[in-house]
Amino acid sequence: MAHIILVNPQIANAAWGAGHHPKTMEEALPRHSLTHLSAVLKEAGHKVSLLDLRLLAGWEQYGQTLKTARPDVVCVTAHTLEVEIALECLVRAKREVRNCTTIAGGIHFTMFPEAALNSGAVDSVLRGEGEWTLPRVIASPGDFDPVIWGQPPDLNSLPFEDRSLYPDYCKRILFPLWELPLPTVDLLTGRGCPWSCRFCCGPGEKNLYTKASSQNPTKRIPYIRRRSVDHVMAELKELDRCYGFCSVIFHDDQFLMKPDWVMRFCERLHREGYVRRGLRWWAASRSDMICRHPETVKAMKEAGLKVLSVGFESFNDDVLAWLRKGVDRDTNLKAAEICHQFGVEIYANVIFGIPRDDGKWYIEDDLISAKAIEQMRPRYFSPSFFNAVPGSWFFEWAEENDLFQNELLAKRGSRCLDQCWIKGVDYHKLGELIHRLQHKLNRPWHSRLRSFFRNRNLTAL
């Protein structure tokens, strides 16, 4: 049996200690990749601990915890915006526990394994999915190369996520999200997305959820799959027994990917009594899938769907074509009409500041989107600034056209509204535009958050 510490370096969009009194979703939610890994490692007989930087006071506490625990293995995951922090975690792990094995994983190190190896503090880089492969690497590290691809698991054979990895999980599920009734749990029903939008770091999930091609073992091809309805329902039953949830967030990239699966799932929610007791849930979809399958959206609503997150991105046909989104303005507007028709609340995702193929940004494109959103009046509005994130088609295009404002790779992994990403974009004008739009839409979820922090005893989190 080995003692394994799993590290969440998530302070790029949170802060040291923020996890004790979270005020944003990024500060509150557990990390699914780590709870999945913890489950399989514990099943293999290992001792597993968590080091989440959001729960620590600073680097001194991080180092002291490692020195006291003296783990055999330290595993660090990373998104691109966390890469510098993740590398620091690995370096400090080697410094504090010299004989420990360090393993890097996550989407960034999957795309750029050399970033970890060049640090001099990493023994292995595990690319892709780790549930089946990580226990084997820990049991017999000498049998593997420094950089390896994880064998993608059969999702129905995996144990349920180990939410006990977060000892305060029963309090985290009391964090208010989108006016859903509390407590709220979250889970995944599948992995991957079959579409190929140019702005995504994993179009068609070619960067993370892959398997070796049967015709050419050196080539990776997308491997998109979903758990069975029975398997998802079994996890919901376990979560209900442990936490008595009132709502669920399904964090799949595209929940409405296979309508037949969704219809069977909705039927089971009725049969198992979740709908009768008032369960509410949140999921994500594309506008074209909503338009192609309105009867499925209706069934989702009747099965407790409260909020549907829709990636509209833009309402300009030329911009949508440039993004390779695969939809047009009319499809976006029709999808919104369908949601309104069935009483489904819309969580509208829109990207502002997108340069055209000539490398220039035109505010008229964003004015069109703003006007459409104002007319649509979604329940929730989620604006972001365009950034050519690593792994996306736009990343190399932006580099070739010298469009990045910041040379740091980690600064290219976010679309938050607090920074300027692309040259030639007037972010002051965009900020004013978005502020006016948010004011008109009232932002009900933000009002609920303010009420939550004003009225609730925050020491409970």
Image (cartoon, rainbow, N blue to C red):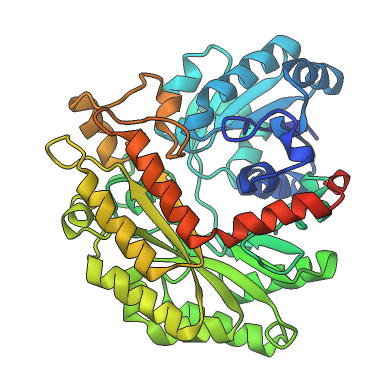
The image shows residue 252 at horizontal and vertical percentages of 51, 60
Left or right: 424 in relation to 69:
left
Is residue 391 at all visible to an observer of this figure? no
Residue at image x 67%, y 41%?
27
Where on the picture, by quarter, is residue 139? Answer: top right
The image shows residue 128 at horizontal and vertical percentages of 48, 42
Residue at image x 42%, y 51%?
436
Q: Residue 112 versus residue 336: which sits nearer the camera?
A: 336
Residue at image x 48%, y 34%?
418
Q: Residue 342 versus residue 32: which sits nearer the camera?
A: 342
Judge whether 163 appears above or below 127 on screen. Answer: below
The image shows residue 305 at horizontal and vertical percentages of 57, 76
Judge whether 186 appears above or below 200 on screen. Answer: below
Residue at image x 56%, y 28%?
104
Left or right: 423 in relation to 6:
left
Q: Residue 279 versus residue 270: which sits nearer the camera?
A: 279
Residue reaching furthest left? Answer: 358
Q: Residue 213 versus residue 352: which sits nearer the camera?
A: 352
The image shows residue 71 at horizontal and vertical percentages of 78, 25
Question: Which quadrant: the N terminus?
Answer: top right
Left or right: 378 in relation to 4:
left
